[in-house]
């Protein structure tokens, strides 16, 4: 189920692709990330990767995107983020994001 909190915004939109490394699986990172994204009114998805990292694609208000990226540098209390790689999402990636926020199966 996708939950959407409405947010009015006059800020420019941004989209980012993230890879988060460290102790980020088995510590509630995806659930906490999803909640943080929803609270900020962002669209996108998050998933575990087989290499032990977490991958995410987020789109929405530019300030909200940056705020979520700042949060992701430390994550929930049990996580230990060692490295976060970010890049602007490609136009095809951003265009494929549907409204709401999803937890995708591991890749």
Image: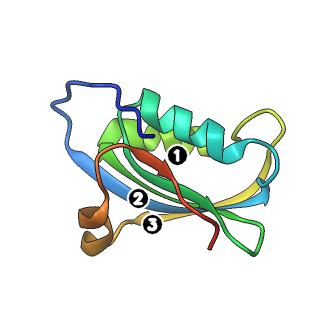
Coordinates of residue 89 in the picture (x, y in percent):
36, 66
* Labels 1 and 3 touching (C-beta < 8 A): no
Q: Which residue is depicted at the point 20% across and 24% down?
A: 8
Q: Provide the residue designation for mark 3.
A: 87
The CA span between labels 2 and 1 is 9 Å
Which quarter of the picture shows residue 50? Answer: bottom right
Q: Which mark is residue 106?
A: none
Q: Position of residue 69 (x, y in %)?
A: 52, 46
Q: Quadrant of residue 85?
A: bottom right
Determine the secondary structure under disc 1: helix
Instruction: In the rendered view, tell whether residue 100 sits above or below residue 44.
Output: above
Mark 1 lies on residue:
69
Q: Are marks 2 and 3 in contact (CB under 8 Å)?
A: yes
Point out the image quarter for the N terminus. Answer: top left
State yes or no: discs 2 and 1 in contact (Cβ < 8 Å).
yes
Asked if residue 97 is positioned above or below residue 69 in the image, the reply reads below
**Image spot of residue 10 (x, y percent):** 15, 31
Observer-nearest residue: 48 or 57?
48
x 23%, y 47%: residue: 13
Gap between marks 1 and 3, in whole Å? 11 Å
Where does residue 25 sit, x and y in percent of width and height? 78, 55
SS state under label 3: strand
* Label 3 neighbour load within 10 Å: few <14, some 14-19, many 20+: few
Whether residue 77 sits left or right of residue 37 in the image: it is right
Badge 2 local density, few (<14 within 10 Å), some, or many (20+)?
many
- The disc at residue 16 is 2
Instruction: Tell me if residue 106 comes above or below residue 4 in the rendering.
Output: below
């Amino acid at each position: 189920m996708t939950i959407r909190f409405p947010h009015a915004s006059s800020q420019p939109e941004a989209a980012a692709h993230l890879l988060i490394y460290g102790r980020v699986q088995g510590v509630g990172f995806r659930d906490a990330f999803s909640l943080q994204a929803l609270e900020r009114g962002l669209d996108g998805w998050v998933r575990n990767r087989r290499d032990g990292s977490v991958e995410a694609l987020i789109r929405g208000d530019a300030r909200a995107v940056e705020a979520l990226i700042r949060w992701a540098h430390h994550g929930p209390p049990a996580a230990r983020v060692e490295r976060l790689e970010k890049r602007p999402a490609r136009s095809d990636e951003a265009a494929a994001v549907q409204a709401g926020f999803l937890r995708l199966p591991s890749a």
